[in-house]
């Protein structure tokens, strides 16, 4: 086994990782939830952000990032098996709360490992030919988070996981649309090549200061796909009750608000990153709850 003594000394600080929670499209841990649930959600969020930070670290070559991810996986396994927090090296501050959450709620490990695998894939694949391939990536990078959220809320079921996957994949696709320039800076393009060809969008167009017409049309197409995915996942909200229902509605509404913000910017995601404001989020939340009344969903 790789020794944690060899772990990177520049692993991101826990405070810096958790600060990102405030800039997400959706509330990571809504004040609508009791404190213990918020802490469990933040523990999972902290781990997911840590994995992404290691996979995206611009100071490290892909081979070094792969090594860091391997070290993290070993540290995760040790933490979940009850190892002392200090043995997790620079990852301990974030893995400690995660281990307590997993042990307290008997959460599955497999979704956590899929998040690491998504970032391994990022070191090997920088382009996706088709939507099917990109959705396969989202099954590793986004869907596991929704599955863990359902388990934290105590409402996990195969039917609900399938609906959650639609919402999580939509949220990931929306972020890909927002972050075209940022992803390109990391050498990655998450817009399917077949869709780019469909609208005559060349990769060189992504380097421009402002989005041209082909890229705007492409982004509009991807946003329509994301909106359909959010609609497909809406029965999940209808089948929940109480605070879990409000929290999942807030996740979905965050995606809807982000779509509205991008469309308001006429799908120009290069001039600036379109972000939803408080009012847009509130309106989207109310609309999501109204729409869920008309949808049926899996019941306990």
Image (cartoon, rainbow, N blue to C red):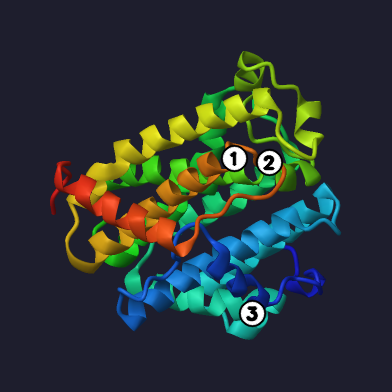
Asked whether residue 108 appears in the rendered view, the answer is no
Q: Are marks 1 and 2 in contact (CB under 8 Å)?
A: yes
Classify residue 17 as left or right of residue 162.
right
Q: Which of the 4 quarters of the picture holds residue 233?
A: top left
Foreground pick, 171 / 68: 171
Q: Nearer the viewer, mark 1 or mark 3?
A: 1
Classify residue 273 as left or right of residue 126.
left
Q: Name the residue rendered at 49%, 41% in the picture.
A: 139
Residue 15: assigned label: 3
Q: State the image coordinates of residue 140 (x, y, percent, origin top left).
A: 53, 44
Q: Name the residue rendered at 75%, 71% in the picture.
A: 11
Query: In this rendering, is residue 219 above or below 79?
Result: above
Q: Name the residue rendered at 80%, 46% in the picture.
A: 185
Calculate the distance from the C-alpha at mark 2 to the C-alpha at mark 3: 26 Å
Instruction: Locate the C terminus by quadrant.
Output: bottom left
Q: Secondary structure at mark 3?
A: helix
Query: In this rendering, is residue 100 above or below 222?
Result: below
Instruction: Locate the N terminus by quadrant.
Output: bottom right
Q: State the image coordinates of residue 247 (x, y, percent, origin top left).
A: 32, 63
User: Can you identify the residue that label 2 sits on?
Assistant: 180
Q: Which of the 4 quarters of the picture holds residue 85?
A: bottom right
Of the residues under marks 2 and 3, which one precedes in the sequence? 3
Q: Nearer the viewer, mark 2 or mark 3?
A: 2
Calculate the distance from the C-alpha at mark 1 to the C-alpha at mark 2: 6 Å
Q: Secondary structure at mark 2?
A: helix
Q: Secondary structure at mark 1?
A: helix
Classify residue 23 as left or right of residue 26.
right
Classify residue 204 as left or right of residue 97.
right
Foreground pick, 152 / 187: 187
Q: State the image coordinates of residue 93 (x, y, percent, origin top left).
A: 61, 80
Q: Which of the 4 quarters of the picture holds residue 151?
A: bottom left
User: Can you identify the residue that label 1 sits on?
Assistant: 177
């Amino acid at each position: 086994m790789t020794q944690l003594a060899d772990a990177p000394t520049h692993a991101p600080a826990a405070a810096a990782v958790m600060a990102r929670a405030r800039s997400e499209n959706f509330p990571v841990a809504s004040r609508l939830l009791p404190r213990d649930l918020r802490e469990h959600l933040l523990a999972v969020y902290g781990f997911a952000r840590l994995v992404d930070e290691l996979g995206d670290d611009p100071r490290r070559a892909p081979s070094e990032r792969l090594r860091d991810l391997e070290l993290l996986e070993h540290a995760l396994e040790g933490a979940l098996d009850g190892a002392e927090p200090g043995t997790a090296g620079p990852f301990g501050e974030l893995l400690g709360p995660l281990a307590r959450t997993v042990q307290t709620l008997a959460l599955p490990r497999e979704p956590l490992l899929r998040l690491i695998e998504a970032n391994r894939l990022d070191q090997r694949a920088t382009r996706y030919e088709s939507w099917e391939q990109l959705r396969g990536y989202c099954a590793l990078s986004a869907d596991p988070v929704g599955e863990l959220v359902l388990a934290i809320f105590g409402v996990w079921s195969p039917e609900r996981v399938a609906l959650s996957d639609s919402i999580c994949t939509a949220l990931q696709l929306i972020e890909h649309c927002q972050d075209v320039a940022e992803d390109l800076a990391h050498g990655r393009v998450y817009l399917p090549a077949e869709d780019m060809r469909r609208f005559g969008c060349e990769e060189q167009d992504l380097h421009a200061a402002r989005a041209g017409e082909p890229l705007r049309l492409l982004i509009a197409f991807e946003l329509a796909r994301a909106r359909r995915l959010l609609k497909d996942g809406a029965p999940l909200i209808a089948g929940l009750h109480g605070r879990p229902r409000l929290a999942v509605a807030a996740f979905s509404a965050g995606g809807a608000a982000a779509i509205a913000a991008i469309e308001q910017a006429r799908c120009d995601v290069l001039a600036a990153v379109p972000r939803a404001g408080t009012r847009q989020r509130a309106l989207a939340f109310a609309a999501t709850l109204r729409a869920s009344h008309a949808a049926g969903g899996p019941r306990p």
